[in-house]
Image (spheres, coloured by chain):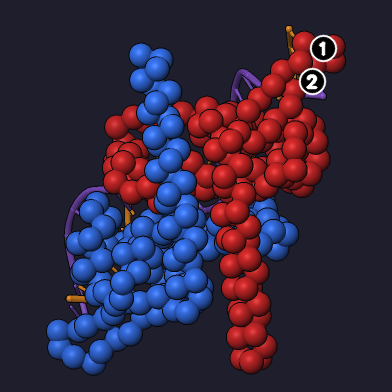
Chain colours: A blue, B red, C orange, D purple
Amino acid sequence: MGKIKENSTNNLNRKYIMSDCNLTYSVCLVGGRWKLLILCKLEHGKLRFSELKRDICNITERMLTLHLRELESDGIVKRTVYAEVPPRVEYQLTEIGKELIPIWKQLSSWGAKHRELSKTVCEVES
Amino acid sequence: MGKIKENSTNNLNRKYIMSDCNLTYSVCLVGGRWKLLILCKLEHGKLRFSELKRDICNITERMLTLHLRELESDGIVKRTVYAEVPPRVEYQLTEIGKELIPIWKQLSSWGAKHRELSKTVCEVES
DNA sequence: CAGTATCCATTAAGATACTG
DNA sequence: CAGTATCTTAATGGATACTG
């Protein structure tokens, strides 16, 4: 995101971690605050930039652009530009992107379950 | 991690995103550079602080401590202190923590597949 | 419509030294 | 052994204004 220093320890650690472990590799590609949120909006088909922006309340154009660019360069979403005026651009999941769908569904259920559990703990405590 | 400003837009966005979407809620709990790496070391049982540090090349004590504390307070790992000298502390997955195992295995396979695919693309291009 | 560019605020990560 | 404390750097996120 933005500019990164090639030889910062931070960046070297990131590289080490990505090369060492497929799991962390995935997290690097798909982690971060907005990425999965963007991806799951695309689950049911193509969306335009403005539709994504509308669906993801609070995201700025900058953040949306940056993350879409990364997802695109990582081959997880496909960007199609139509030569029209006004311009039309559509985003959709690639094949490998679609393979994430079952994973984020499970992660989502896990989150729901965890949330329920925490709620119970709080109620018992209060 | 460390101190966060309660009312920064950043923090408010994080809260919004966590309350809105179970998926992002999960990512917030378990995302970040080191968390899944720590968790997957614990897959096969208990480990001590020093064993984790040794197994996770390059992590600093500070990072390990901070993440373990978060995972603990989120109920994903359990910390057991034995009243011995020298001190012994063991970490293990909780029940809800263990339910993440199949998920990270799939994410890991997805990562491996994605990596293969990218390699192919590079070879074709070069 | 679909973005860029710029600048600033906030947070995450790391180095190092130290302690019960 | 299992951490804290303190300080510094790097990276991410956001606000705002502007453009082909």
Q: Secondary structure at mark 2?
A: strand
Chain bearing tag 2 is: B
Q: Secondary structure at mark 1?
A: loop
Chain bearing tag 1 is: B
Question: At 58% from the left edge and 35% from the top edge, which residue is drawn?
Answer: B95
- Picture quadrant where residue B117 is located: bottom right
Image check: B18 left or right of C15? left
Asked whether the residues under marks 1 and 2 belong to the same chain, the reply is yes
Kindly identify which residue carries mark 1.
B84
Q: Residues within 10 Å of mark 2 (few under 14, many from 20)?
A: few
Q: Which mark is residue B88?
A: 2
Residue A17: x and y in percent read 68, 56
Question: At 40% from the left edge and 43% from the top edge, which residue is drawn?
Answer: A112
Q: In the picture shown, does residue C13 fall above or below B94?
A: below
Q: In the displayed image of the protein, which residue is found farthest to the right?
A: B86
Residue B82: x and y in percent read 76, 15
- Picture quadrant where residue A111 is located: top left
Residue type at tag 1: Glu
Question: At 69% from the left edge and 59% from the top edge, which residue is drawn?
Answer: A21
Tag 1 near tag 2, CB within 8 Å: yes
Residue type at tag 2: Arg
Image check: A109 left or right of B78? left
Front-most of residues C20 and B50: B50
Question: At 61% from the left edge and 91% from the top edge, which residue is drawn?
Answer: B125
Residue B73: x and y in percent read 52, 27
Q: Residues within 10 Å of mark 1 (few under 14, many from 20)?
A: few
